[in-house]
Image (spheres, rainbow, N blue to C red):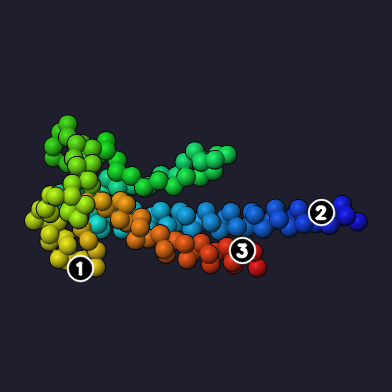
């Protein structure tokens, strides 16, 4: 009889784990895309190359091969109309040195973008700031997804 209970509990835990893993995987995937969208809104703009180079990737490089969701700037993305130039030539400088993170001021197109989006701060630190902005929503969605999965 004890073996039966352990087997039943084991199956129940396995099934719950499968449901929760699926639920959390979707929340993390959606959350990653929300960070990409927010980072693009926060990124400075001139020709739009930097915004377009903000991407996400999921790898199985976590502990025990678990998924890791990464938001990054594709530094190898080419700058349109400027052969041999890449987004990586300036992306880190912009990220680390533009206001509000650094001493550099926004250019005219970035100031225009800021004026058109008063609820979003355009400028440096756009990836970290986007992650900070979106994380509370991801956590709420994660809590709701886990609660639903274990019902």
Tag 2, which secondary structure?
helix
Nearer to us in this view, 26 or 93: 93
Residue named by callout 2: 6
Picture coordinates of residue 112, whole percent (x, y)? 12, 61
Q: Residues within 10 Å of mark 1 (few under 14, many from 20)?
A: few
Picture coordinates of residue 133, whole percent (x, y)? 34, 61
* Label 1 to label 3: alpha-carbon separation: 38 Å
Residue named by callout 3: 149
Q: Residues within 10 Å of mark 2 (few under 14, many from 20)?
A: few
Nearer to us in this view, 101 or 54: 101
Question: Is residue 72 in view from this perspective?
Answer: yes
Front tag of 2 and 3:
2
- Quadrant of image for the N terminus: bottom right
Question: Is residue 37 in view from this perspective?
Answer: no
Q: Residues within 10 Å of mark 3 (few under 14, many from 20)?
A: some
Residue named by callout 1: 118
13 with respect to 93 (left or right): right
Marked residue nearer the N-terminal end (1 or 3): 1
């Amino acid at each position: 009889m004890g073996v039966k209970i352990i087997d039943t509990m084991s199956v129940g835990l396995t099934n719950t784990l499968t449901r929760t893993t699926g639920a959390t995987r979707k929340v993390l995937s959606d959350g990653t895309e929300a960070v990409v969208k927010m980072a693009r809104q926060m990124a400075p703009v001139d020709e739009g190359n930097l915004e377009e180079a903000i991407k996400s990737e999921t790898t199985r490089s976590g502990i025990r091969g678990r998924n890791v969701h990464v938001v990054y700037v594709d530094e190898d993305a080419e700058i349109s109309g400027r052969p041999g130039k890449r987004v990586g030539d300036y992306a880190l400088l912009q990220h680390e040195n533009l206001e509000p993170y650094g001493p550099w001021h926004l250019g005219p197109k970035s100031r225009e973008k800021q004026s058109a989006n008063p609820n979003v701060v355009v400028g440096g630190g756009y990836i970290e700031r986007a992650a900070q902005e979106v994380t509370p929503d991801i956590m709420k969605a994660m809590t709701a997804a886990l609660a639903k999965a274990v019902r």
